[in-house]
Amino acid sequence: MKEQRHPVPPFNQQTALQKVKAAEDAWNSKDPDRVSKAYTTDTEWRNRSEFLKGRDEVKAFLERKWRKELDYKLRKELWAFTANKIAVRFEYEWHNPDGNWFRSYGNEMWEFDEDGYMSRRFASINDLSIQAADRHL
């Protein structure tokens, strides 16, 4: 029997906001192990054009991501929710190893199992090249 990851579905306004804030905090830690533990062992992801299956693939993806996306800072906003699904909009800023800055925008659709682990994550993301002086996160 696995441990529950609170809050668990069904979500209400308060618990959906808690789930979004917990995800924002975890991703801003840039700790692939910490972040990956929020997902089921067989989680399904679409991130841009990349399709992942399972927590191990998610962890490896995040390790690659944060080697490329330096000084990463993220903000998430609750968009909508149902009993076990949450939709968020987000933006994050980062720079590549050459020092070029970007702001990435997108939407994520999340589905959770009964224990509060994310079983599905579908992300659509667009990148905008910015100047360092234009950063706001």
Image (tube, rainbow, N blue to C red):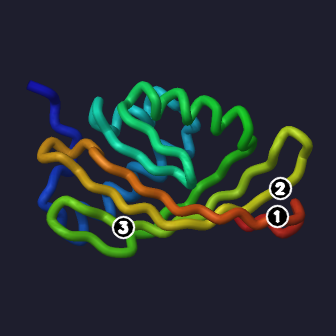
Dot 2 alpha-carbon crowd within 10 angstroms: few under 14, some 14 to 19, many 20 or more: many
Say whether residue 58 is left or right of residue 7. Answer: right
Left or right of 12? Residue 95 is right
What residue appears at the point 38 percent right and 50 percent down from the top-left corner? Answer: 22
Figure label count: 3
Name the image quarter holding residue 30: top right
Spatial CA span between label 3 and label 2: 26 Å
* Residue 18 vs residue 33, the one in the foreground: 33
Q: Is residue 89 above or below residue 55?
A: below
Give the quadrant of the C terminus. bottom right
- Left or right side of 136 for 8: left
Q: Does the residue at mark 2 contact the one at mark 1 (Cβ under 8 Å)?
A: yes
Find residue 126 and report its horizontal and vertical position in percent: 65, 65
**Which amino acid, by three-letter code, is at mark 2?**
Trp
Q: Which mark is residue 101?
A: 2
| Residue 36 vertical placement versus 78 (above, below) | above
- Residue depicted at x 68% and y 47%: 72
Specify few, some or many for label 1: CA neighbours under 10 Å numbering under 14, 14-19, or 20 or more. some
The residue beneath circle 3 is 87
Query: Which residue is depicted at the point 33% across and 57% down?
Result: 110
Point out the tag, 3 or 2, that comes first from the N-terminus.
3
Q: What's the distance in space between the residues labelled 3 and 1, CA to CA? A: 25 Å
Q: Secondary structure at mark 1?
A: strand
Pinpoint residue 117: horizontal percent, then vertical percent: 25, 42
**Residue that numbered label 1 is attached to:** 129
Q: Is residue 46 above or below residue 129?
A: above
Query: Where does residue 40 sit, x and y in percent of width and height?
Result: 27, 36
Q: Which of 51/86 is in front?
A: 51
Residue type, numbered disc 1: Ser
Identity, as a three-letter code, of the amino acid under mark 3: Ala
Name the mark nearer the viewer: 2 or 1: 1
